[in-house]
Image (cartoon, rainbow, N blue to C red):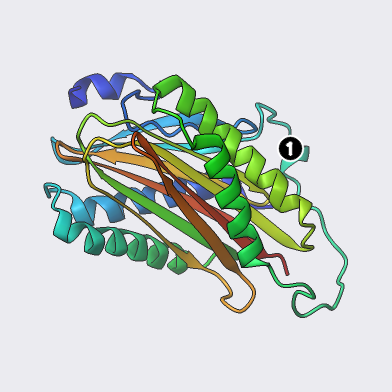
Amino acid sequence: MDDYQTEEEESAFVVEESVEATIGRNTYQHNRVNQWSTSVVEQCLGQLGKLGKPFKYIVNCIIMQKNGAGLQTASACFWDNSTDGSCAVRWENKSMYCIVNVFGLAI
Amino acid sequence: MSDQQLKHKSHRREKRTGKVPSEASHGARGKETTGRTKDSVSTASYMDDLGHHDDNARLVVTIDNTYQLGPYKCFPVPAVTDILKDVLTSYLQEEKYESEWSQKMTKTICEVIRARVKDLMIPRYKIVVLVHIGQLTGQSMQISSRCLWDASNDTFASYSFKNSYLFGVATVFAVYFE
């Protein structure tokens, strides 16, 4: 039986690394954000795939400029609680927020 | 907030305008890790099963083979898009953005969408519903998703709504359970 807690932690670690590597030291730029979010998500997905676990993954990324605006995000899932799980990673620097949600569904 | 202060707070979730509340049926245990650079900060939270920590909740249920190769009934994307449009419009039409209200509203909308998609009774599909509600203050943002799945069976539906004060985006992912 897999120790699921470590898998969620493992994916959180993978995500944090990907975000840091892609947008770590950048300031928010509207014309580059599309490329950044695509890159963050694809890197995360690539690394998660390399873990070789029998899961289907959904990775969702939000990059938002810091403006004092509020944002709420919620998710509801209809799945098997014993095998499936999710994790959310919130990252910020001086100019932007980045929120990444990863859902892992067992095959 | 300095990095030093963050290291001492092991179980508290940070509160700032970019909050991510989890859905009502699963709580989140916050684990803080400091960013490597001085100006970035990151936190991660995971799903917890309702505070139950008994092993029974985590035992995998073995299901007998049905020898079914694919879904008999496809996931109806247009029908689900209509559901999303209907729910978002009816809940958000004339509303203004308020922090407490939108917290409850995102969770409510999530649960309503999940219930309505379940009512469609599509067998062997697992559903993930994501809802974002944000304030419109001229900021720029980008929301993107990628999935590692079986493209012939799995799909998604999405709808975004906007009024003068706020925007709402709802996405439903449907993943076939083999």
For the residue pair B130 and A59, the one nearer the viewer reads as B130
The kind of secondary structure element at disc 1 is helix
Task: Using the image, determine if residue A9 lies above or below residue B71.
Answer: above
> Count of labels shown?
1
Viewport quadrant of the N terminus of chain B: top left
Mark 1 Cα within 10 Å, few/some/many (few <14, many 20+)?
Answer: few
In percent of the image, x 31 and y 28: which residue is there?
Answer: B17
Left or right: A29 as drawn, with respect to B132: left
Q: Is residue A15 visible?
A: yes
Viewport quadrant of the C terminus of chain B: bottom right
Left or right: B43 as drawn, with respect to A105: left
Instruction: Give the residue type that dot 1 points to.
Output: Asp
Where residue B171 appears, as percent x and y from the top left, is 52, 53
Q: Is residue A107 visible?
A: no
Task: Using the image, determine if residue B99 lies above or below residue B81.
Answer: above
Q: Residue A36 falls in which quadrant of the image?
A: bottom left
In percent of the image, x 77 and y 72: which residue is there?
Answer: B73
For the residue pair B135 and B34, the one nearer the viewer reads as B135
Task: Using the image, determine if residue B175 lies above or below residue A14.
Answer: below
Chain letter belonging to callout 1: B
Where residue B88 appears, as percent x and y from the top left, is 53, 43
In percent of the image, x 86 and y 71: which residue is there?
Answer: B65
For the residue pair B167 and A6, the one nearer the viewer reads as B167
Left or right: B17 as drawn, with respect to B155: left
The residue to which callout 1 is attached is B55
Where residue A47 appears, as percent x and y from the top left, is 39, 64
Task: Using the image, determine if residue A29 lies above or below residue B15.
Answer: below
Left or right: B164 as drawn, with respect to B79: left
Where residue B140 appears, as percent x and y from the top left, is 23, 46
For the residue pair B36 and B112, the one nearer the viewer reads as B112
